[in-house]
Amino acid sequence: MPFIATGLSHHLAPLPVRERLHLDEAQIVESLRALVAHAGLRGAVCLSTCNRTEFYVTTRDERQSRLATERFFHYLAPPSGAAEAVYVHPGREGLRHAFRVAGGLDSVVLGEAQVLAQFKRAHGLARDAGTVDAELDLIMRRAVQAGKLVRSSTGISRQAVGYGQAAASVARERLGALTGVGVLVVGAGTVGGATARLLQRRGAGPFLVARRGRKAERLAELLGGGLVALEELPQLASAVRLIVSSTSSEERVLSRRLLAAVRRAQGPGAGLLVLDLAVPRDVEPEAAAIGGLELLDLDQLGQVIEANLSQREVHRPAAEAVVDRAVGELETELGRRSAAPLITALVDRAELVRQGELERTLSRLRPLTAEEREHLDRLTQAIAAKLLHHPIAYLREHADDPERRQLMEEAFGLEGAGEE
């Protein structure tokens, strides 16, 4: 099969190498056009993320395409030792690799969802660049379909594995339904903001955001919440059952004393969950001893993530089976497509012979009526069709076997009929 998946990833290439080989969208388009124009490729797609840069290509000459892409990686990062990290997966192995990438089965985090969107974007960029042929377009579309099916038909993406996802999951376990649960967000950076948005999607609110600069103002606006000073927290205690803290401060931000005051203001019937997502930690560890307060830090949330990853691994065999079925179905379809030109050539050859012999026979007979000529024409058509039935059925049945296609080409004198 004229398909290759080649590149490097987190499995073999350390971060410094991946950084040098990472391509932005403009570089991807330029690279694809150069490779297709000069490397004997029929089509090419490039997927470049923080964890991988790889090409999916359809090719006229596998060896030439391998050498061209290897030289390309060397050109991008000659002193990096990238050559040792570059893998080449041809044919079925390459298809399976691409499908596993789309399904999140080759990711750092098993079953991650982001890579599917990146895969679709890579396909779109290649289409815009004009470097996708019909076969590669089919391969990419089927890989995306398989990636969706992996996630929808198995449990491989159900457990939370990011810190923000784990925080939202733990909040749901500890506090029950999050609808109407008031949240204080301390720190409006990437982790804090993402966690707050996850909580909001699960129904939590209203939100308060600690007044700590312009990012806090933007996050409060996004969440439809208010800005507060931490010193005001005891007065707002009745509105807060969950605190998410993730600042870059080198000092403790939430003291035991402040949190104890919040708990006293809440009353004995309430409870307070505090999720400390910062390194160094934002919350004084002694706060864990306060009655009615539960404090979880990154190490404890990491245990949740590890447990959830273990649960995801249970679903790996089912996910791999989805990929294998999808690859098998695609191979069959690609094989049929590759047999189609040969079938067409065989039918055309038979028709050419039929018409020639018919005309030669008619020229030797007495003049026939139009009706008699039509009868002879139909007779020869029926004979040709019956003779072609089994060869065509054979080609369709063994469409994915290049050796059998070659045998049929040689048997009928059709060498090169399936080439472009």
Image (spheres, helix red, strand yellow):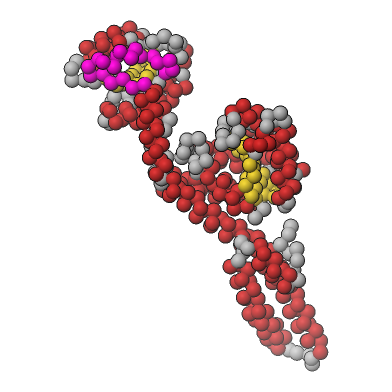
Determine the residue positioned at 73% across, 73% down.
412
127 vs 167: above or below: below
Answer with the quarter of the image where residue 264 lies: top left
Left or right of 159? Residue 48 is right
Please state, as top left, top right, bottom left or bottom right, where the C terminus lies in the image: bottom right
Q: Nearer the viewer, residue 351 or 263?
A: 263
Q: Is residue 117 above or below residue 400?
A: above
Query: In the rendered view, does 69 fall on the left or right side of 156?
Result: right
Quadrant of the snapshot with the N terminus: bottom right
Q: Give the residue drawn at x 67%, y 64%.
A: 403
Q: How many marks?
A: 0
Confirm whether residue 236 shows in the render. Answer: no
Q: Position of residue 5 (x, y in %)?
A: 63, 45
Quadrant of res 30: top right
In magenta segment, residue 4: no
Task: Farthest residue to the bottom: give it.
Answer: 366
Q: Position of residue 302 (x, y in %)?
A: 39, 28
Whether 369 is drawn above or below 408: the answer is below
- Residue 203 horizontal/vertical position (percent): 33, 29
Nearest to the observer: residue 194 or residue 413:
413
- Residue 76 x/y as whole percent: 70, 31
**Extreme residue in the left direction:** 268
In the image, what residue occupies the spot 42% across and 18% down? 278
Residue located at (66% from left, 33% from top): 82
In magenta, the rendered stretch is: 278-297
- Would you say 134 lies left or right of 217 here? right
Seen from the viewer's position, the closer of residues 183 and 277 is: 277
- Establish if 284 lies above or below 19: above
| Closest to the observer, 419 or 78 | 78
Q: In the image, is residue 279 part of the stretch drawn in magenta?
A: yes
The answer, for residue 38, to whether it is visible in the render is: yes
Relative side of 113 to 46, left or right: left
